[in-house]
Image (spheres, rainbow, N blue to C red):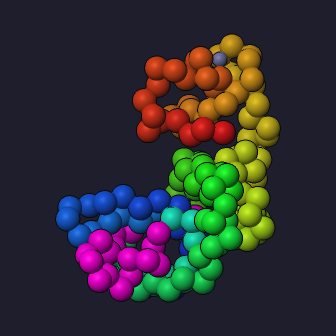
Amino acid sequence: MITAVTKAIIVARTPVRERDATITLYTPIFGIIEARAEGARAPKAKLGPHLDPVRRSLVRIVRKNGFVIADALTENAWGSVKADAPRLRDALAACAIICAIAPREEGDEKTWHEINRQFENGTASARTILRQFGYGAADVCIRCGRSASRWYVPDHAPLCTECSAHIPERDIVIL
Ligand SMILES: [Zn+2]
């Protein structure tokens, strides 16, 4: 791939230096792609709003020393999800799980369309995404067998609140 145009669910955005960001894209053909957005955080950045998490955008990606986002346009900002605090919390957790478990640079169009539909319907959550990727109900802690409330990213495994108490927050997604 030198240049590609793809639909992408924006699942994470990490600040880089003063004005740039690394954007994590979930795409039908390429799976997860991390791409640089240069100037995305500048005050009047044209791309910025189209690369915020929990939205679907049409993105043009160029490969040069890694991936760079050349252009992006929102297709659906899922405004009704964002206007509803519990659904937004679930959608953000869904994005965190996609980041944690979707394959890197290897797509699956059927799964992508199912997940896109979950965001469209406002039903996307950490647990619906886990089921979509074949992790079942993820409802029992793998360490003690109590009811699971967290996903432990490094082990790809569910944990209860007690067993996850001392794990750094960046390694945990709340279910
Ligand atoms: Zn436990």
Task: Please check the rendered image and state whether residue 73 is part of the magenta-colored stretch, yes or no.
Answer: no
Identity of the residue furthest to the left in this view = 18
Residue 30 placed where, x, y %?
56, 69
The quadrant in which the C terminus is found is top right
Q: Nearer the viewer, residue 94 or 1?
A: 94
Q: Which residues are magenta?
A: 31-52
Q: Nearer the viewer, residue 130 or 164?
A: 164
Q: Is residue 134 left or right of residue 78?
A: right
The quadrant in which the N terminus is found is bottom left
Q: Is residue 39 left or right of residue 23?
A: left
Q: Nearer the viewer, residue 157 or 83?
A: 83
Q: Is residue 5 left or right of residue 111?
A: left
Q: Is residue 59 above or below residue 154?
A: below
Q: Look at 23% across and 70% down and name the residue there.
A: 19
| Figure quarter occupied by ligand 1 | top right
The part of the image, by quadrant, that contains residue 110 is bottom right
Looking at the rendered structure, the number of numbered marks drawn on it comes to 0
Task: Please check the rendered image and state whether residue 42 is part of the magenta-colored stretch, yes or no.
Answer: yes
Residue 169 placed where, x, y %?
45, 34
Q: Look at 52% across and 20% down and name the residue there.
A: 165
Q: Look at 70% across and 27% down and name the residue there.
A: 148
The part of the image, by quadrant, that contains residue 74 is bottom right
Q: Is residue 35 above or below residue 69?
A: above
The part of the image, by quadrant, that contains residue 112 is bottom right
Residue 39 placed where, x, y %?
26, 76
Q: Is residue 13 above or below residue 151?
A: below
Q: Is residue 46 visible?
A: yes
Q: Is residue 28 visible?
A: no
